[in-house]
Amino acid sequence: MSRLFPSLALGVATAIAFAAPVQAQSGPTTLLNVSYDIARELYVEINKAFIKQYKDKTGQELTINQSHNGSSRQARSILEGLEADVVTFNQVTDVQVLYDKGKLIPADWQKRLPNNSSPYYSLPAFLVRAGNPKNIKDWDDLVRPDVKVIFPNPKTSGNARYTYLAAYAFAKHTYGSDEKADDFIKRLFANVPVFDTGGRAATTTFVERQTGDVLVTFEAETNGIRDVSGADKYQVVVPPTSLLAEFPVTVVDKYADKHGSRALATSYLEFLYSDQGQTVLANFYNRTTNEKIAAQFKGKFPPVKLYRVEDEFGGWDKVNKEHLDSGAKLDQLFGAR
């Protein structure tokens, strides 16, 4: 078992089972939340809080099952038949594909919950070893020849695609052209000794295997590692600029309707927007959309200029076409590493 997180060595699907029902139930009492790779511990706590609240209101006991992997892998698994009641992903495109390729959700899924169905957000940040021996402060430090960088494969991980887009936006603003940004990304990829399939595997490579000088992952993960492993071993560096990483959620209509769990699944996602849910999210170093809760946790989050996909790349549809689709820019640059 990993020293970093108790669940680090678990498989793709992890079941969090709570007490069995104590009375006849009037509706479904089980949900499957299919989520991104590094959210295991977060949703253990979300589930505990939601289950208690739901029991207090209804008297019903619930079981919430979790499945975690790279978000794009998870989306493919659902398209191939994994019957998720809800998804809590880290990239809009991995939710959108459930409509585009499977018609499992409606086209207007983002309109069903506040903030385009994204209850919290984060950004790519850096985790370095104590004392920051390579003096890593910004994105251009990641392409120095003496720096080895760890982040997952951007072809399988939404986490890594945010890293790719954040680095690309930085390079384009800093060096002034797509051509120079392309060269920057090639040099960045060349500094990555191993591409794991998901964010948690990359964490394992950096922390357990002691590979690399800097881990690039969501700010929430960098802070969690530092808290668990100790500030005497790791420190967090938030670069001056990064990319807004939204965390979209939705009921998976086809399967929730099949299971009769739509109402329960909707309540579960609405809980993420509640003061209690937002507090759990902030305690795990996610930046929240609730202004009151955000103000309470302001001291946890250093200021950073956030680029937006819509402003820098013309939106996710254009990002897919120009960067992420088969044969597009990511394939070209990744193949050149």
Image (tube, helix red, strand yellow):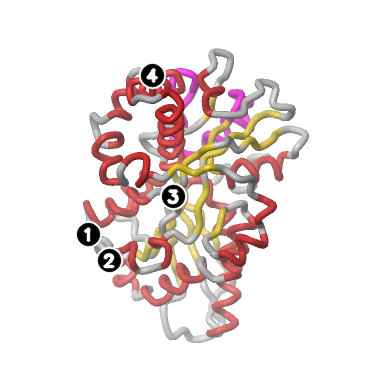
Query: Which residue is the site of mark 3?
Result: 90
Image side of residue 81 versus residue 128, left or right: left
Q: Secondary structure at mark 4?
A: helix
2 or 4: tag closer to the N-terminus: 4
Query: Which residue is the site of mark 4?
Result: 183
Disc 3 versus disc 1: distance between alpha carbons?
20 Å
Q: Are marks 2 and 1 in contact (CB under 8 Å)?
A: yes
The residue stretch that appears in magenta: 189-214
Residue type (three-letter) at the residue carrying disc 4: Asp
Residue type (three-letter) at the residue carrying disc 3: Asn
Position of residue 295 relative to residue 54, above or below, is above
Magenta stretch contains residue 312: no
Position of residue 229 relative to residue 100, above or below, is above
Query: Which residue is the site of mark 1?
Result: 103
Magenta stretch contains residue 204: yes
Q: Residues within 10 Å of mark 4 (few under 14, many from 20)?
A: some
Residue 281, given in percent of the width and then of the height, sits at: 58, 59
Give the mark toward the camera: 4 or 1.
4
Disc 2 versus disc 4: distance between alpha carbons?
43 Å
Disc 4 versus disc 1: distance between alpha carbons?
38 Å
Q: Residue at x 34, y 62 (%)?
A: 110
Give the mark toward the camera: 2 or 1.
1
Q: Quadrant of the C terminus?
A: top left
3 or 2: tag closer to the N-terminus: 3
4 or 1: tag closer to the N-terminus: 1
